[in-house]
Each structure stands twice: as structure tokens, then as C-alpha cells.
Image (cartoon, rainbow, N blue to C red):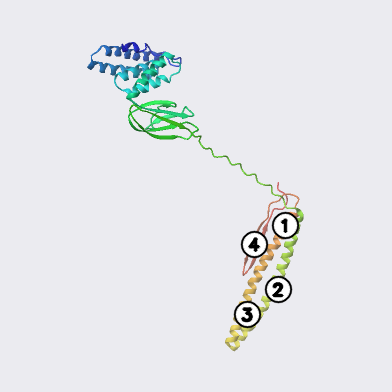
Amino acid sequence: MLTALLVASPSATAAQSSSENAEARVYFEEGNRLFEQANRARAGQRTELLQRSLEAYVDSLRIVRSRNALFNAAIVLGELGRNDEAFNYFGEYLAIEGLTAADRENATARRDALRSEVAVLQVTSEPGGALLWVDRKDLAPRGETPIELALPPGEHRAFVEKEGFEPVERTQTMVRGVTTVLSLALLPVAVAPVEPEPVPEPVAEPSRPRLRNAAIGTAASTLAAAGVAIGLSVHARTLRDDYNQAAAQSRLTGDPADYQRALDLADQTDRYNLAADVLWGTTIGLGISAIVLYGVHRKKQKREAPDVAVSVSRHGGFASIRMQIGARP
């Protein structure tokens, strides 16, 4: 008799409350009662009683996921011809720790008897303990590797994920009566190496003799530029006088040659004035640089860096220097 194969009551655990156990036991015993009636009933009524028995076991499992309810539900599913679900219920039952050798052998034999009727996907991974989804990632995972699942024949997508490892997705075609084996070697997630921050090299403070020599060289360049600027300014003044004379001569004679000579002198005067302005601006900049370099060389306390501004045009030059006097507080 199939009735003798049903276990008596769901196992309770310390973590589950007594009220939950009591409610689950009521559904479980109702499932056993209906299953016994189904075995005594005729064919038409038997299917209805088996379906009601399965619903009672499922209600019990919603409250307490007991191994006895799993086993009994798997038997009823097999009686109803729902072999895929029966195979998976037996698989969940066999994953429970603490089964006796006899219970494990009995459930394994019953599950193996269904293999010819179902398409089985067997998934293993290295390392194990990876979560498995089939076809849809928006639902709860079907379990952890290693795992065997009965699926409808056809094409299915398997998603395998484990924290710290790259996710894997595979598409398999399932055939009734065939166990499809999917063995995966999970690769660790690549971690970008942390680049050490570069250690700035210490900047050597220029020695005082170098600063002093630079100040002296800059001062010498200042004097040279000033000398050239003076020479250009003097020559420009001479050209200006010649231009004035040529312009007066041109106005008296009206001679085109005198007028052209006056234009040439005016152009030369402008060029010399512009060159003199540029050199005067350079002279100012070099002079300020010499002062700054000498001040840095001579300083004994840390001071604000001087703020220097130079502006040069054909109409003249302008320079300014702003620096703190005295040590910082």
C-alpha cells in the first residue's frame, strides 16, 4: 500500500514557534488523511482527493519547510503524473542534513526512478555554493550548486552567481530522459591593483651662491639693456629733430622729394621709439628680477613671494612689484 510510505508527522525545530508547528501539523495530517482516502477511492474521485492532499501538504510547507511534508508531497506529485515537480521535491528533501541512511537511500531510489520521465539539468561549480536561476533572474534562485533540477524539455538559460566571482550564463537544450551536465569553473572578480600615490621628490632649495650669482647676472643684463635703450632713445630724438627740419623744408618748397624724406624720417623715428620702449620695459623687468633674486638670497625669514607685473607698449612701459615686508606671523 502506498499509504505506508507516508511519514507520520512533520519534524519540528527549536527555531519554529509551537503555534506554527501546530498549524503546520493540522495541514500535514489533513494531507495524510486525504491521501489515504484517495488510495481507497475509484479513479475519478482519486485524482480529486490526490489534488486536495497535495494542497494540504503545500499549505503545511508554507508554514514549516519540514522534510516529512516534502517527502509526502513528492509522492503525491508522482501519483498525479507531475514528474518534474516530484523530482525536484525529492531533490530538496535529499539536500536536508541529518537524514538517516535508510531515508536517503529510499528518496534517492524514488528520484532516480523518475529520470527516464524528465529532462534533468545537473549543475556543479568550482567553488560550490553558487546560486542558480533558470530562465528568469527576477524570481528566487532555484538553489545552490551542486544541484539537479527537472525542467520541461527544450531550451533553458541557466544563471550562476557567487559573491566574489564573475557571473556565468549558459543556454542548454534539455531532452526528456537525458541528464544534461553543466560544470563551471567560476573566475574571481578582477580587482584593479591599487596604484601607490607617487611620492614627490624633495625640491632642493637653491643654494645662496647660485641665487647671488643669478642676481648679479640679472643686474648686469639690466645695465646692458638700459644702455642700449638710452642709445635708441638718443638716436630717436636725433631723428625727430631731422624730421622736424625736413617737414619745415617740405612746407616751404612743396618739393615731393622733401615730403618723401620727411615721411621716411617719421617712420624711422617711430621704429626707434618702439624699440626703445621695448628695451626700457625689458630693463625694468630685469631690474625687478635682480631685486627679487637678491632679496631671496638675503632673506633669513620666510616671506611672501613678490607679485611682479610688467606692461609694455609703444607709448611707454609700466612695472609694479608687491611684496610683504617682514616675517609672517
> Residue tagged by mark 2?
231
Q: Is residue 279 visible?
A: yes
The residue under the point 39% across, 22% down is 91
**Which numbered disc flags the more N-terminal residue, 2 or 1?**
2
Q: Which sits in the foreground, 210 or 252?
A: 210
Asked whether residue 12 appears in the rendered view, the answer is no
Tag 2 and tag 1, C-beta contact below 8 Å: no
Q: Closer to the N terminus: mark 4 or mark 2?
A: 2
Is the residue under label 1 in contact with that under label 4 (CB below 8 Å)? no
Amino acid residing under circle 2: Gly
Q: How many marks?
A: 4
Of residues 282 and 94, the one drawn nearer to the viewer in this rendering: 94
Q: Is residue 85 left or right of residue 252?
A: left
Q: Which mark is residue 234?
A: none
Image quadrant assignment for residue 28: top left
**Residue at the (74%, 64%) spot, across then down:** 220
Q: Is residue 215 left or right of residue 43?
A: right
Marks 3/2: CA–CA distance: 17 Å
Indicate whether 299 appears above or below 150: below
Q: Position of residue 7 (x, y in %)?
A: 37, 12
Rendered residue at 67%/67% (across/down) = 280
Amino acid type, label 4: Val
Q: Between tags 4 and 1, which lies in front? A: 1
- Viewport quadrant of the N terminus: top left
**Alpha carbon of mark 4 to alpha carbon of mark 3: how far?**
30 Å
Q: CA distance from mark 3 to mark 1?
A: 42 Å
Q: Is residue 218 above or below residue 246?
A: above
> Quick one: SS at disc 2?
helix
How many neighbours does mark 4 have within 10 angstroms: few (below 14), some (14-19), or many (20 or more)? Answer: some
Residue annotated with mark 4: 310
The residue to which callout 3 is attached is 265
The residue under label 1 is 293
